[in-house]
Image (cartoon, rainbow, N blue to C red):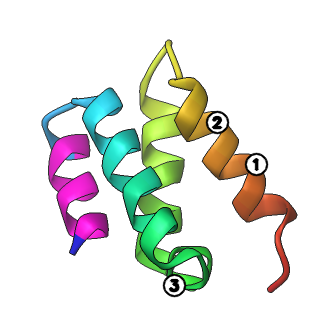
Amino acid sequence: MLIDVARAFALREQVDEAADALTRAEAIGAGYVRDSDRARRVIAELLAAGDRVPTALADLAARLDGGPG
């Protein structure tokens, strides 16, 4: 559900809120977020859309790129 919440925030260009939702989703189920194509798409869209990338989002993206799978 939090990935869908992040997507909704992303559609409204609320990058900080989307990053927070994704970080909370990872805290609850890191493996699910890591393996979710939807989460990866939202993260990629957020990274591509803004001039300012929240640290939490950049860190999450780095963990997903560096993680197994």
- Residue 36, how many percent across, how many down? 50, 81
Q: Could you say whether the residue bearing mark 2 is in a helix, strand or loop?
A: helix
Location of residue 57 with respect to 28 vertically, above or below: above
Q: CA separation, marks 2 and 1?
A: 6 Å
Location of residue 22 with respect to 30 vertically, above or below: above
Q: Could you say whether the residue bearing mark 3 is in a helix, strand or loop?
A: helix
Residue toward you, 62 or 46:
62
Residue toward you, 57 or 12:
57
Quadrant containing the N terminus in the rendered view:
bottom left
- Residue 31, how many percent across, how many down? 61, 83
Residue depicted at x 82% and y 70%? 67
In the rendered image, which residue does mark 3 sit on?
32
Residue depicted at x 49% and y 13%? 51
| Residue type beneath disc 2 | Ala
Q: Earlier in the sequence, mark 3 or mark 1?
A: 3
The magenta stretch is 2-10
Q: CA separation, marks 3 and 1?
A: 16 Å
Quadrant containing the C terminus in the rendered view:
bottom right
Magenta portion: prevailing SS class: helix
In the rendered image, which residue does mark 2 sit on?
58
Q: Residues within 10 Å of mark 2 (few under 14, many from 20)?
A: some
- Residue 6, how many percent across, how many down? 27, 54
**Residue furthest out toward the front:** 28
In the visual, does 50 lie left or right of 8? right
In the rendered image, which residue does mark 1 sit on?
62
Residue depicted at x 85% and y 80%? 68
